[in-house]
Image: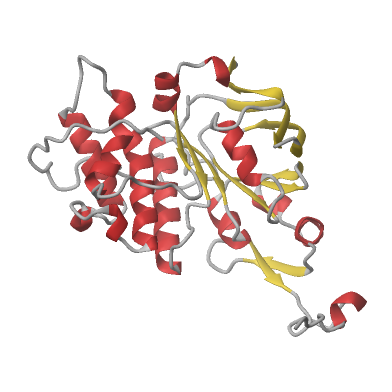
């Protein structure tokens, strides 16, 4: 994310729909097994022998990862398994204790900050906006990596901001202070800023946080549009397994700081993997809409008769 204030002048509104991606023959409306993805020549993001820690406590160990270029990758796993920590390292927000993160074969720590901000956008879990900042100005901050002392606010910046506002349904709230928005509206404003930044790689830490179900789907559809129509590489941390299966091309399942499985959703999200990663028994059935794996959890009160002995015992109640 960028933290430099955008220019305050705001030229006239762009033509309706300006800056909003359009479908193409290689986009979401095309057919065929690979038709949803346009050819991508985006940057390659990978990690080698990665060890990450907080205050001396190891969180991720000996991790190797190659992010599929031009695809949507979802990282899933139980709480505290290292998902967000890994994403922070991929964004250069956390320095590895050992190993390296590379962008097109160059160590991330060696890439100049402005160049990195033009290539890689990050939406952290709980971003905070300065008091009184309007939605338009917040989204405009995404354009600061594209500005220099000789090239300030431009018509292209204006178009990108209005396009991001329209794509996230925030045009009517552009002049509202961010701190007056609901939690869901605020999250959409931060996503709009990441969209306006225009980077070929987007890293999103739980982008559906605080959103009701309808807006969760809106945001995931928007992310899919950016990927399918513009070829952007997306890596996002998600808690909802069914949404991960429906929207991701590549799923990474993590447990205790390690990758347990990765690949297409149908190969990763299996009953055995869900039980291993989440300690949750389930049944997997095809999603009737998308055909992707649909996870049906089993519990003590809702199961199919095949219950483990430990699941059959009522949970202890603590006063």
In the picture, the quarter occupied by the N terminus is: top left
Q: Nearer the viewer, residue 6 or 206?
A: 6
- Kindly indicate the quadrant of the structure image that contains residue 314: bottom right
Q: Quadrant of residue 184?
A: bottom left
Q: Is residue 283 above or below residue 50?
A: below
Relative image position of residue 168 (x, y in whole percent): 32, 53
Q: Who's the residue at 21% across and 55% down the image?
A: 176
- Residue at x 13%, y 41% (from the top left corner): 14
Is the residue 31 above or below the residue 122 in the image? Answer: below
Nearest to the observer: residue 106 or residue 95: 95
Q: Is residue 24 visible?
A: no
Question: Which residue is depicted at the point 34% across and 42% down?
Answer: 193
Apparent side of residue 66 relative to residue 21 in the rendered image (left or right): right
Q: How many marks?
A: 0
**At which x and y percent is residue 57?**
76, 39
Residue placed furthest toward the right: 309
């Amino acid at each position: 994310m960028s933290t430099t204030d955008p220019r305050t002048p705001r030229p006239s509104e762009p033509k309706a729909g300006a800056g909003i991606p359009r479908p193409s023959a290689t986009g979401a409306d095309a057919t065929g097994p690979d038709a949803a993805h346009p050819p991508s020549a985006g940057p390659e993001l990978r990690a080698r022998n990665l060890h990450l820690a907080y205050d001396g406590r190891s969180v991720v160990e000996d991790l190797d990862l190659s992010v599929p270029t031009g695809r949507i990758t979802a990282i899933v796993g139980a709480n505290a398994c290292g998902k967000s920590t890994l994403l922070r390292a991929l964004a250069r927000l956390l320095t590895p204790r050992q190993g390296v993160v590379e962008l097109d074969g160059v160590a991330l720590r060696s890439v100049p900050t402005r160049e990195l901000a033009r290539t890689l956008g990050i939406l952290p879990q709980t971003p905070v906006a300065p008091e009184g900042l309007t939605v338009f100005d917040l989204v405009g901050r995404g354009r600061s990596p594209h500005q220099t002392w000789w090239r300030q606010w431009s018509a292209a910046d204006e178009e990108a901001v209005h396009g991001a506002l329209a794509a996230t349904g925030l045009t009517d709230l552009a002049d509202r202070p961010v701190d007056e928005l609901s939690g869901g509206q605020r999250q959409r404003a931060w996503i709009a800023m990441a969209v306006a930044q225009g980077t070929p790689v987007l890293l999103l830490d739980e982008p559906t946080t605080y959103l009701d179900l309808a807006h969760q789907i809106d945001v995931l559809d928007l992310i899919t549009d950016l990927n399918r129509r513009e070829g952007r590489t997306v890596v996002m941390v998600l808690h909802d397994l069914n949404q991960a299966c429906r929207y991701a091309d590549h799923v990474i399942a993590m447990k205790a700081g390690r990758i347990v499985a990765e690949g297409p959703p149908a190969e990763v999200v299996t009953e055995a993997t869900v039980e291993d990663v989440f300690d949750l028994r389930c049944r997997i059935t095809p999603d009737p809409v998308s055909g992707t794996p649909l996870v049906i959890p089993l519990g003590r009160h809702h199961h199919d008769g095949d219950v483990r002995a430990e699941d059959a015992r009522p949970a202890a109640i603590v006063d």
